[in-house]
Amino acid sequence: MLTVGEAMQQGTRLLEDAGIAASRLTAEVLLSHAMHCQRVYLYAHSEQQLKEVEWIHYGRYLHERMKGKPTQYITGRQEFYGREFRVTADVLIPRPETEHVVEAALRAVKRGSRVLDIGTGSGALPITLRLEAGVEAWGTDISAAAVAVARENAERIGAPVRFIVCDLMAAIAPGSMDVIVSNPPYVPLTHKEGLQREVRDWEPHVALFAGESGFEIYDRIVSDAPRVLRPGGWLIMELGFGCFEHVTGLLSAWQEVRVDPDLAGIPRVISGRT
């Protein structure tokens, strides 16, 4: 049986040969997951022999990753805004870029504000805003399986958030929200084959694709948001690649429209007030 150090080396080599990015880090994450330990433990115990069950699990995780399965779906975990969220293939993996939506929303809310997240997935946005700002948070998703994951995250993390299965905000009462946030689907169907296989083959398509143009969900959200928002309410959305001009056009009649770039200077979040 291999030692911990030998297992890391072998896993790194296999992942490199398979063209997996960050192969060393990925091997460490998968091995620590197999051993139910922190990554730092691997370096402090590099001469430790792996148990048979640990080697079996590690081998399976490596095989899954080499086939393209995202590491987060293998471990079932992803960090977002300093908290660990459970993720499954039923939800989009939360990205660091979406934390910019949180930052924009924190400028708009106050304690007790009613906030709705459309297309909530894992529940990362409403859970984070509930805990960071003390808002009354709601989340919707068309996928019942995604809502089940979001509810589990809210209960485990300790955030009282209400989740509803519906199409966008169809089940939300008129004039009931102070702020709407969303990281909507924005990938055009015509771009499907150009996506990374980890995204195209593993993440839920309902959370990725928005018609032939990629603008379909933006159009629907902006159209219905004034019905749901209270007077002076905010709409805050993540911007996908190539969506800037179209979405700014949709909000041309809104007040205080603002676009926030990400760390690379790319337009990432747009905000507007009714």
Image: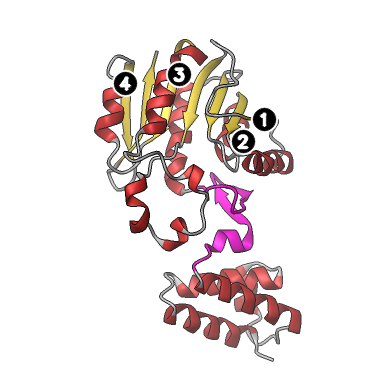
Q: Quadrant of the N terminus?
A: bottom right
**Residue that carries the numbered disc 4 in the rendered image:** 251
Q: In the rendered structure, are the residues bearing label 4 and label 2 in contact, judged by CB atoms less than 8 Å apart?
A: no
Mark nearer the viewer, 4 or 1: 4
Closer to the chain start, of discs 3 and 2, is 2
Which residue is denoted by mark 1 in the rendering? 161
Return the mark for residue 144: none
Residue contact at pointers 1 and 2, CB within 8 angstroms: yes
Mark 3, residue position:
224
Residue 215 against residue 29 in the figure, above or below: above
Up/down of 1 relative to 207, above or below: below
Residue at 65% x, 40% y is 150
Mark 2 — residue?
127
Mark 3 and 2 residues: CB-CB less than 8 Å, in contact? no
The x and y percentages for residue 115 are 56, 23
Cβ atoms under marks 3 and 4 closer than 8 Å: no
From the viewer's side, name the closer residue of 256 and 74. 74
Q: What crowding class fits label 4: few (fewer than 14 Cα within 10 Å), some (14-19), or many (20 or more)?
A: some
Q: Is residue 153 visible?
A: yes
**Magenta residue span:** 68-94
